[in-house]
Image: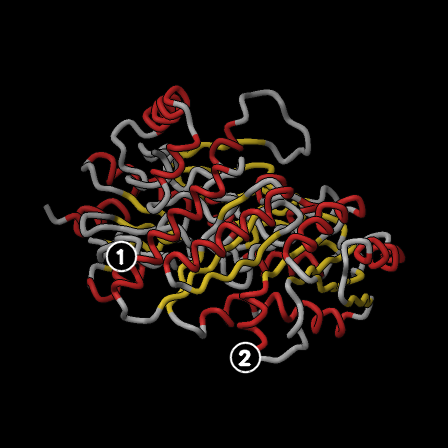
Amino acid sequence: MDHEAGLRAVLGESASLITDSEITLSYSRDQAPFAPHEAAAIVLLAKSTEEVAKAVAYANTHNIPVVPRGAGSGLSGGANADSSSLVISLEKMNKIIELDTTNLIARVQAGVINLDLDKAAEEHGLAYLPDPASRDWSTIGGNAATNAGGMCCVKYGVTSAHVRALTVVLADGQIIELGSATKKAVTTLDLTRLMIGSEGTLGIITEIVVGLAVRPQTPATIIATFPSIKNAAAAAAALLRFKPSMLEIIDQTTLKAVEAWHPLGFEVAGSVLLMQLDEDQERADEVLDLCQSFEMIDGAATSEAADAVEFIRVRKLAYPALERLGATLLDDVAVPISKIAELVERVEGLAAKYNLTIGIFGHAGDGNMHPTIVHDHGDLDAQKRAIAAFGEIVEIAQSLGGTASGEHGIGSIKQGFAAQELSPAVIELQRSIKKAFDPKGILNPGKKLP
């Protein structure tokens, strides 16, 4: 059957439908290497919730798999399609519908870029606080679908802490509203939180109401070096008493990669901590005093924005410095803060076992770490070793009381690992929920759920 003609009949001739496989291929995957994908059959560049609803209803009638897509910034294969798929891209739905400075909320379409919303809020002395590393180009809809995190999560929480309400298109094309613009709402079951992080498997988020905050003061930024990751991780746990708005850690392997590219003076450091205080900035000296008790090698603090940029530069360079060394496979696990040092130590053992470079950096304040596996471009044997190491890293994190993903999501690459964390009863309950929302299983099949 000619589904392009069928969709045009439903959507109208002005619908932005793409069927050229060379173009649809570029809409058929996210940033996850090795995650399977094929050029989608059709891509719809949706312009409205109603258009999404009509397209999904058509797909449901004809049993066409539907893959929702934001900016494609994901790292789990969660937006990957196959040759029978209809990809619904929300990138054109990028309007900030309302910015309410009295009630401190914004209503946005799903395709609004994270940073664009924050900049719009800044004009009113407000802020949209969630800050995934991809905030310059990731969308609010994608952030909600994956429950994205970021460096500020240690204080302000992940995306779900800031979402008030959602407009969602269900698998049969029905449009529903979930949640409330009010800060408190306990009238119904919390289906809003169920939808957040569901990775497009239960419905397609088309509009979001998010909470805004009074913009924090310019933070004090502290940098401290330590002889080992063990010292730095122990210091990080102790520093939580200061309620940091950022607390990041970098291991020695990553520091060496940074130094080889942009020498910043970390030659003797075994690990680096970066911390920000957006309140109680005057306590920066107390932070450094506490770090001294964990054998800090050197430390400094600043309240100057330009100096802060220089301090944080080592964290910004972490991933690109490792990427310079070869092809990379970026993992995402979360462990209890007390287990960060053990995670790094055991991953160092994996690096030796598989003859790979594995650098680790991440969010020390909440235990969400990003081991980054480096292997030679085009070396198929090294690629296999990297994939094996990736799996073992997840299993190590789980054995330490952690989880397979803290913020990147499960997508198409971690279902098996997710199943290892869940009881059969919980897995069956999740499958029942999926069936209730999507009886035919058309929404992002093969993603998220074990």
In primary-sequence order, the first of circles 1 and 2 is 1
Quarter of the figure that contains the N terminus = top left
Residue 279 visible in the displayed image? yes
- In depth, the one of 384 and 244 nearer the eye is 384
| Marking on residue 393 | none
Q: Is residue 110 visible?
A: no
Residue at numbered disc 2: 261
Q: Quadrant of residue 379?
A: bottom left
Read off the residue under disc 1.
17
To which quarter of the image does residue 377 belong? bottom left
Image point (44%, 48%), residue name: 393
Helix, strand or loop for disc 1: strand
For the residue carrying disc 1, how many other residues have a C-alpha within 10 Å: few (<14), some (14-19), or many (20+)?
Answer: many
Rendering coords of residue 143 (x, y %): 51, 49
**Residue reaching furthest to the left:** 1
Residue 191: x, y in percent?
Answer: 50, 28
